Image: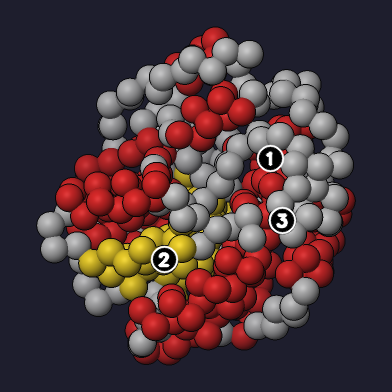
């Protein structure tokens, strides 16, 4: 399978008007996972331009170092703080918490669980879970649990704090969350079938992670409404936005380069794809319990808010997601 693929290089249509409408983020602290490229990079840069102190959570790598220097170069006087946090290791996530807490003496205003990988091979992490599920959901579940005291502190001081998750239109591929994908079965979940339209196992696993991201948001929203409405949970989706996800997936064999080039003609720029994230992070008009993107199934366009969908915002799915995620991190998550 050829790994020759270049991003289309779409022009942005909606990015500047939306960003210009957002309020200042002075005195806000925003933590974002997965900022080395794509929409996470854009979100980090934009938040810094708006005045926020931005905590960058990435696995240690030369790529992380290079992106950190680029971010600093792009925004003069930006307040960036680089913290090692490898989402393929629960131990690494736990080790990052003390550093993050020290950077947030008056609380954490926004936790943006952005990082993700797509259609990777059927492999296990060091903890034994599917590499996609642990990267995209389980480690974010743990990170959110461990940072909840700092989010609660900010909510009390500033009137609100937000948890922002990042899903995808792929959540529609698998309408039922299945327990085995949340269990310690990494490397034993269907193999490496790469067909996007014929339930290739790589894409089934990816879809399950994106469904988990949305269901996690529904869980948090329900719990926040009962315990502390100053805490808010929302989820973004980017439509079909060009990013490094396609390049890395082609390289790993999850998509063919010819098909990817054809498919991405239907997409939009990564800047426009980042608008759902940015609205969830910074737009005061976005309330808890919504999904923000270019339509519920849209591939491109302005990011708009919609109610959470019933195929994941239901008691059975939320109960399964929460219990299996607590089991995976070996901790109870009480809100």
Q: In the image, is residue 249 above or below residue 263?
A: below
Q: For residue 206, which numbered disc appears in the image? A: 1
Residue at the spot of label 3: 126
Q: For residue 83, which numbered disc appears in the image? A: 2
- Which residue lies most toward the left here? 76
Please provide percent x and percent y for residue 162: 46, 70
Given this view, does label 3 or label 1 mark the residue nearer the observer? 3
Please provide percent x and percent y for residue 100: 43, 75
Q: Residues within 10 Å of mark 2 (few under 14, many from 20)?
A: many
Q: In the image, is residue 244 above or below residue 163?
A: above
Quadrant where the N terminus is found in the figure: top right
Secondary structure, mark 2, is strand
Q: Residues within 10 Å of mark 1 (few under 14, many from 20)?
A: many
Sequence-first tag of 2 and 3 = 2
Q: Which picture quadrant has residue 194?
A: top right
Residue drawn at (50%, 72%) of the image: 96
Apparent side of residue 8 relative to residue 72 in the rendered image (left or right): right
Given this view, does label 2 or label 3 mark the residue nearer the observer? 3
Residue 229 visible in the shown view: no
**Of 138 and 87, which appears nearest the observer?**
87
Sequence-first tag of 1 and 2 = 2
Residue drawn at (59%, 73%) of the image: 94
Q: In the image, is residue 92 above or below residue 214?
A: below
């Amino acid at each position: 399978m050829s790994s020759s693929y270049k991003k289309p290089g779409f022009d942005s249509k909606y990015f500047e008007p939306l960003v210009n409408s957002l309020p200042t983020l002075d005195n806000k602290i925003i933590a974002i996972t997965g900022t080395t490229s794509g929409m996470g990079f854009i979100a980090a840069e934009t938040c810094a331009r708006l005045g926020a102190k931005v905590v960058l959570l990435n696995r240690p790598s030369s790529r992380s170092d290079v992106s950190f220097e680029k971010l600093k170069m792009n925004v003069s006087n930006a307040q960036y703080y680089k913290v090692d946090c490898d989402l393929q290791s629960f131990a690494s996530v736990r080790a990052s918490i003390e550093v993050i807490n020290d950077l947030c003496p008056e609380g954490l205003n926004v936790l943006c669980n952005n990082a993700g990988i797509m259609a990777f091979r059927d492999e296990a992490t060091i903890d034994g879970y599917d590499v996609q599920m642990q990267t995209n959901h389980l480690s974010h579940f743990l990170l959110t649990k461990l940072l909840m005291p700092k989010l609660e502190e900010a909510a009390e001081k500033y009137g609100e704090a937000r948890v922002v998750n990042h899903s995808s239109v792929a959540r529609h591929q698998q309408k039922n969350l299945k327990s085995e994908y949340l269990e310690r079965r990494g490397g034993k979940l269907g193999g490496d079938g790469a067909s996007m339209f014929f339930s290739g196992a790589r894409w089934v696993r990816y879809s399950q992670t994106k469904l988990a991201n949305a269901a996690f948001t529904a869980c948090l929203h329900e719990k926040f409404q009962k315990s502390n409405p100053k805490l808010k949970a929302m989820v973004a989706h980017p439509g079909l936005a060009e990013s490094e996800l396609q390049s890395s997936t082609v390289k790993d064999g999850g998509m063919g380069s010819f098909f990817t080039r054809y498919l991405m003609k239907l997409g939009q720029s990564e800047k426009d794809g980042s608008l759902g994230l940015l609205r969830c992070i910074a737009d005061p008009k976005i309330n808890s319990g919504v999904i923000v993107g270019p339509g519920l199934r849209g591939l491109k366009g302005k990011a708009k808010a919609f109610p959470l969908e019933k195929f994941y915002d239901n008691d059975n799915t939320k109960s399964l997601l929460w219990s299996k995620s607590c089991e995976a991190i070996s901790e109870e998550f009480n809100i």
